[in-house]
Image (cartoon, rainbow, N blue to C red):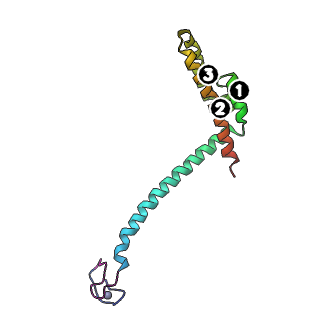
Amino acid sequence: MFCPNCGRQIPDGSKFCPYCGAKLSLAGEPEESQVQTVLSEEERKKRAYEEELLRAKAQQAARVGIKSPGVAAVLSFFFTGLGQIYNGQVGKAILFIILGTISIGLMFIGIGFILYPIIWIIGIVDAYNTAKNANDALLRP
Ligand SMILES: [Zn+2]
């Protein structure tokens, strides 16, 4: 290679010209651009992941549609799983109904009195949050 400053022939890969002392950016460049590539690869993965998250959220929102979080919560208040049915999450509703039924059955041995209120409250909170998140995702500009 040749020094771009003085034009003399210098060893390949020199970082500085041994004749004039000029800094040769070419020699250091490959290393730096490699670091840049690694960083942008990481950044790209992060962005792809965030996009995937947003897409999953939007898909769930589209399934749920515009719902009233209040109505969902009230329905779950009166019957565990009903708020999930209102939100269109039938599988989740069935899960809550099964868990609720099991915990009512467990009231005969006492533990149901603790378990049922927990499932009941989780059902209300989940119904409210699902409806609210769906609305937030759908109404986002
Ligand atoms: Zn030189």
Q: Which mark's residue is nearer the viewer, 1 or 3?
A: 1
Return the mark for residue 97.
3
Q: Secondary structure at mark 3?
A: helix
Q: Secondary structure at mark 1?
A: helix
| Residue 75 screen position, x and y as percent | 71, 26
Q: Which residue is mark 1?
A: 75
Q: Residue at x 46, y 61 (%)?
A: 40
Residue 8 in the magenta stretch? The answer is no
Q: Earlier in the sequence, mark 1 or mark 3?
A: 1
Image quarter (top left, top right, bottom left or bottom right) of the N terminus: bottom left
Q: Mostly what secondary structure, the magenta segment? A: loop
CA–CA distance in space, label 1 to label 3: 13 Å
Return the mark for residue 58.
none
**Cβ–Cβ under 8 Å for marks 2 and 1:** yes
Q: Earlier in the sequence, mark 2 or mark 1?
A: 1
Find the magenta span and give its range: 12-23
